[in-house]
Image (tube, rainbow, N blue to C red):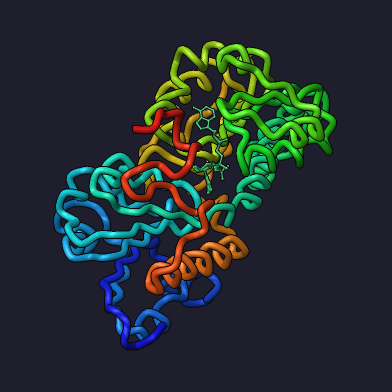
Amino acid sequence: MSSGAQKYKVMAVLYRGGKAAQEEPRLLGTVENKLGLEGWLREGGHEFIVTDDKEGPNSVFQQNIADTDVLITTPFHPAYLTADLFAKAKKLKLCITAGVGSDHIDLNAANKHKVTVAEVTGSNVVSVAEHVVMSMLLLVRNFVPAHEQIERGQWNVADVARNSFDLEGKVIGTVGAGRIGQRVLKRLVAFDPKELLYFDYAPMPAEAAAALNIRRVADLGDMVSQCDIVTINCPLHENTKGLFNKELLAKMKKGSWLVNTARGAICVAEDVAEALKSGHLNGYAGDVWNVQPAPSDHPWRTMKNTQGGGNGMVPHMSGTTLDAQYRYATGAQEILRRWTAGEKQESANLIVENGEYATKAYGERTKK
Ligand code: NAI
């Protein structure tokens, strides 16, 4: 970065890593390790504020938003940039999502204020796809209750085998067949499912669909009614918020499993917990919550199926493996470098630009 160039105020809202971040410098997405950006930004003469304090009007995030030029956030500890905050963010020009999924930014407000939103597209899609396959396996094999039994000093094979199945021969469907959805499906082929299905308004490229031997289903309710396992891999936007509610969950097969690593708010938390409790769902797993950090009494922390299992929830971690952190940290730096140098961004990284959606993934919309 040339020292004569314009100076900016850059703010990053990241999660606190504490001891773990001090011991592991590759935890780049933390307040302590600052996405590896500090030296580079300071060298360029820019102001760089890094915080995890993001809630309420007195938070560091909200106090500094008025004169911030560039905001860097991650979906793992989302700073919710609402329409109200956009109105206050008079100098804001660029929001960078270090990761994938920019729903914590009010994208319609970003368009209204002509703020660019860019993310590091593809940076953690393999990490999430692996987590999805793992989550399917741990639910279908009844892994968590079996491990908990062992930790308790017990040994009762029948008690856990009574709800343990094979992935082979199951019908598996994805809601959203983009980068993550397609990677999940590709990995599932090795397990010999009975059939792979997808629901997406964007058709999968013919070649990819043929390689997977997948069938597209035009109606979501119709698809979930045919699946033993459903995986959600679409962004959160106006048309996917609360999509998996009581009505849609009722259309799922009795005893089926649901895996959601997309966004918590795509499912109605209480309706999922109720479907599990009643036995309609056999299991639910994922790493995304409707509010993050999730409150200690969130129903998804402790919900169980009728046999006391079926819960594969973890904190938002699937897309933040150390491998992924390296990719999204270097990707965020490259977006920033291009922006400060006045260069064009890679088009795949752009979510909104010049007051318009630059991607088709955040809902079907007609151009203004
Ligand atoms: P992508 O843009 O490659 O694919 C998304 C697909 O969803 C597109 O094909 C789009 O047409 C489809 N879609 C949108 N609305 C839909 C709807 N109403 N019904 C069915 N399909 C719909 O995005 P990618 O990279 O696959 O990521 C998907 C989402 O996964 C992200 O937006 C993010 O929310 C989540 N994610 C979660 C991570 C985690 O750590 N848990 C990490 C990375 C992404």
| Residue 166 shown left or right of residue 33 in the figure | right
In the foreground, 112 or 225: 112
What residue is shown at x 53% (from left), y 28% (from top)? Answer: 304
What residue is shown at x 37% (from left), y 79% (from top)? Answer: 41
Q: Give percent across and percent down for residue 265.
A: 41, 33
Q: Give percent across and percent down for residue 261.
A: 54, 40
Question: Is the residue 61 above or below the residue 143 in the image?
Answer: below
In the foreground, 156 or 43: 43
**Residue 52, image quadrant:** bottom left
Question: Is the residue 67 above or below the residue 279 in the image?
Answer: below
| Residue 221 shown left or right of residue 41 in the figure | right
Q: Could you tell me if residue 308 is visible in this image?
A: no
What residue is shown at x 41% (from left), y 26% (from top)? Answer: 239
What residue is shown at x 71% (from left), y 28% (from top)? Answer: 159
Q: Give percent across and percent down for residue 267.
A: 45, 28
Q: Give percent across and percent down for residue 293.
A: 37, 49
**Residue 232, image quadrant:** top right
Question: Is the residue 280 above or below the residue 28 in the image?
Answer: above
